[in-house]
Amino acid sequence: MANKKELRRERIKRSIRKNVFGTAERPRLSVFRSNAQIYAQLIDDNAGRTLVSCGSLKNDAAQKVNKVEQAQLVGKEIAEKALAAGISEVVFDRNGYLYHGRVKSLADAAREGGLKL
């Protein structure tokens, strides 16, 4: 059986996904964080496919800094890839995580990189 924290996050995630929907023009920026890494992807929910993705695991610079700085690097990288793909506006999906710490630093870095959340 899943613990209370996982169940709480799943409930919050479902309520967020009722309102947050990504299109080709304005995809959904979905964030996933594990204990050690953080990942972000831009998703077109109409077509059901991922347009752009990145994470801290394959980024060598991210392995040498703390987790909040890792999230900043991933936020800048996702913004660069999105702008290269012609995407400037996204809908932010925090995926049930609280909006502070690593999730907030990723979103702030994506804004600084040129994305409109």
Image (tube, rainbow, N blue to C red):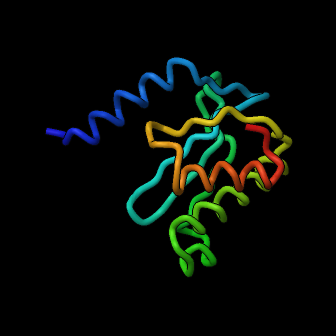
Q: Is residue 110 positioned above or below 5 on the image?
A: below
Name the residue at 72% across, 51% down: 110
Residue projecting furthest to the front: 100
- Judge left or right: residue 92 versus residue 14: right
Q: Position of residue 107 (x, y in %)?
A: 65, 48
Residue projecting furthest to the left: 1
Name the residue at 74% across, 28% down: 24
Name the residue at 65% across, 27% down: 22
For the C terminus, the image quarter is top right
Q: Is residue 81 positioned above or below 26 on the image?
A: below
Instruction: Give the total of numbered labels.
Output: 0
Residue 13 falls in image quadrant: top left
- Judge left or right: residue 25 versus residue 51: right
Residue projecting furthest to the top: 18
Q: Position of residue 46 (x, y in %)?
A: 64, 22
Q: Position of residue 97 (x, y in %)?
A: 45, 42
Q: Nearer the viewer, residue 85 or 110?
A: 110
For the N terminus, the image quarter is top left
Name the residue at 61% across, 46% down: 41
